[in-house]
Image (cartoon, rainbow, N blue to C red):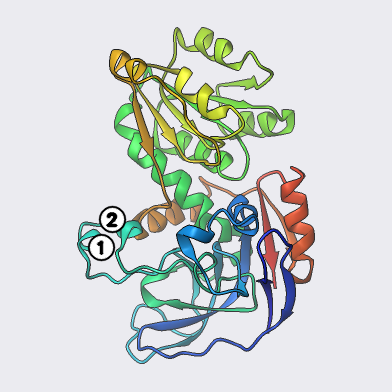
Amino acid sequence: MKAVRLHKYHQQPVVEEVPDPVVKGPLDVIVKVGGAGVCRTDLHIIDGQWEAAMDPDLPYTIGHENAGWVQEIGSSVTNVTVGDTVILHPTPTCGLCRACRAGQDMHCENSSFPGLDSDGGMAEYLLTSARACVKLDPSTRPQDVAALADAGITAYHAVRKAIPLLYPGTSCVVIGAGGLGHIGIQCLAALTASRIIVVDRNPAALELAGKLGAAHTVVADGNQVEAVAELTGGGAEVVLDFVAEEGAEQDGFAMTRPAGSYFVIGYGGTVHIPTLDIISTERNIIGNIVGTYNELAELMELAQSGRVTLHTKTYPLADALGAIADLDAGKVRGRAILVP
């Protein structure tokens, strides 16, 4: 099969032939990939930012946002059958550790992360686990939902945690209306009554944000903190930062009102905040990583009912390098999707 393989950090991956995956364990599932999302994390992987944390054996296949059709199953798989349409939770889990039993399976002690620590889904076939498979309506096209497997669940997870803070009359600032942010805006609109304010430096992204439910849009032109303060009367109850680099991480905390909460979802920057500013205003800084299996299932209910949709640009698998280059150059509005 064809796959997008990373041979060395700081070099572009290559599309090459590799052997098809095979079922080895009783809960293994092989999925014929129908759509694989291209994520900014893939750019970070290529740059070696995940090497220390994941330490995969090179070369390996990247791609951690995947959906498709069940091709083959292990002897003990009962939740899906061959031919089912599925989206895959990005971290196959054990179900036995304390985190899994507490419903926090994204912190599973024994999980893997295909596309980061092992072969992922930028390929024609992907080996995964029965525990990762969320069964979808057979009419669903995998390429239309693939990026919800990571970008979607990450955005939804943050919004889900913020819901108790976003009662009517509150404001929520979304920094970044790109691949994750445009999903977060829709989740906020679907699940809360909060007034949504979106900050982005790209006019096209702000135009999209207005169509998706933003009450106000703010151009990140150097005056965005002041503009948000004016709109919110001193700061928002919640700020969801889908950028968190190149200065956005400082803006995000500054846009949060006293006793408010700054949710860090993007990454790449470093937060510099005097501890006195944290305790004197009682502002919260909250990290977010992926989300639970149940949250992915909930998000798919919103997606299949049309309340959350992905804005995508598709590429054939053979043009994976073109998709990666377009994402890096900021030419992709929404998500880039590889279609084998």
Q: Residue at x 56, y 53 (%)?
A: 49
Residue hosting label 1: 100
- Is disc 2 placed on a helix, strand or loop? loop
Q: Residue at x 42, y 65 (%)?
A: 91
Q: Are marks 1 and 2 in contact (CB under 8 Å)?
A: yes
Instruction: Tell me the kind of residue under disc 2.
Output: Gln
Q: Position of residue 2 (x, y in %)?
A: 70, 80
- Is disc 1 placed on a helix, strand or loop? helix
Q: Is residue 45 left or right of 73 when viewed as pictured?
A: right
Q: Residue at x 70, y 43 (%)?
A: 333
Please, is residue 223 above or below residue 210 in the view?
Answer: above
Residue hosting label 2: 104
Q: Is any atom of residue 255 visible in this view?
A: no
Q: Quadrant of residue 8?
A: bottom right
Q: Quadrant of residue 105?
A: bottom left
Please, is residue 186 above or below residue 250 in the view?
Answer: below
Viewer-nearest residue: 186 or 4: 4
Q: Position of residue 229 (x, y in %)?
A: 50, 10
Viewer-nearest residue: 277 or 311: 277
Q: Is any atom of residue 75 visible in this view?
A: yes
Q: Quadrant of the C terminus?
A: bottom right
Q: Residue at x 36, y 92 (%)?
A: 75
Q: Quadrant of the N terminus?
A: bottom right
Instruction: Tell me the kind of residue under disc 1.
Output: Cys
Q: Position of residue 138 (x, y in %)?
A: 52, 71
